[in-house]
Image (spheres, rainbow, N blue to C red):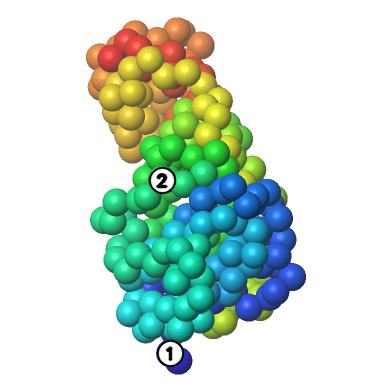
Amino acid sequence: MRFYRREGQHILKDRTLLRRIVRYAEIRESDRVLEVGCGTGNLTHFILKKAGKVYGIEKDRRFTGILRKRFEDEILEGRFILIEGDALKTEWPEFEKFVSNIPYSISSPLTLKLLKSKFRLAVVMYQKEFAERLVARPGSKKYGRLTVLASSLCKAEIVESVKPHVFHPKPQIESAIVRIIPEPQITVINPDGFERLLRVAFGMRRKKFGSIAKKLGIRIPEDLENERPENIPPEIYAELSERL
C-alpha cells in the first residue's frame, strides 16, 4: 500500500512503543477512548486490549476497509465504532481518553478541538517541534501563542521523544509523545480578550510590549514596557486580557 506523506500518513510499527503509548494513557475497561487517524490499526489493536469501547475516526477509505476487516469481531461486539470522515469536521462522540498518532499537518486545529472537548486524559503523538511549542517556557524561542493558550486549558508534558525509524514511511523529523490533562494552569476571565491579546502580541513578537499595548489601547505596568511577548508569562497575559 502506498502512504501519502502530504497527508501525514506515517504508520507506527514498533510494538513496544505502541504498548508504552497505551500505558501512558492508563486505559481501563470502563474507558471510552477516541483515536483520530487510525491508519492500519496498529495502535487501535493495543487500545482495544485495554478499553471497554473505542471510537476511531479515519477519513482514508483504503484504511477504513482494512480496519473493518481487521476488527470485524470488535465491530460486531460494539466495542469498536469506526467513523469515516474528517476529524476536524466530524462531531466527536463522548469519550474519557484520547489516544492518537495524529496527522501532523492538522496538529493545531485538532489540539484546539480536543482542548475544548470534555475528557480526562490525552496521549498524543506530535511532531517534536510542535510538542516543544506546546510545553515551552517563557523566554525560550519555542514559547508563543500556542503555549500561552494551551496553559489556559490544560497541563501538558512531553513523556518521550521518538525517532523516525519507528514509522513507515520514515518522517524527516523527530516526534514526541505528549500527555495532556485538562487542568488549566491559569485563570482567564475574558476569553475573547485573551485570544485577541495573544493574536496581536505574538503577531508583533519583535516589538516591545509597550508598542503592543498602545495598539490595543490598554495601560500596562512600566516594567513590561520594554519586554517582548516571548518573555511574558501566561498569568500576566490572563491578567492583561481583563483590560480589553
CA distance separating discs 2 and 1 = 33 Å
Q: Secondary structure at mark 2?
A: loop
Amino acid type at circle 2 is: Glu
From this viewpoint, which residue is outermost toward the front? 77
**x and y percentages locating residue 4 in the rendered image:** 40, 81
- State whether residue 103 appears in this view: no
Give the number of the mark in front: 2 or 1. Answer: 2
- State whether residue 116 appears in this view: yes
Which circle's residue, 2 or 1, is located before the other in the chain? 1
Circle 1 is placed at which residue position? 2
The quadrant in which residue 215 appears is top left
**x and y percentages locating residue 148 in the rendered image:** 47, 32
Q: Secondary structure at mark 1?
A: loop
Identify the residue at image location x=46%, y=46%: 95
Identify the residue at image location x=52%, y=44%: 96
From this viewpoint, which residue is outermost toward the right? 16
Q: In the shown orientation, is residue 129 left or right of residue 199? A: right
Disc on res. 94: 2
Amino acid type at circle 1 is: Arg
From this viewpoint, which residue is outermost toward the bottom? 1
Q: In the shown orientation, is residue 191 left or right of residue 223? A: left
Vertical side of 107 occupied by 220: above or below: above
Vertical side of 187 occupied by 219: above or below: above
Vertical side of 220 occupied by 162: above or below: below
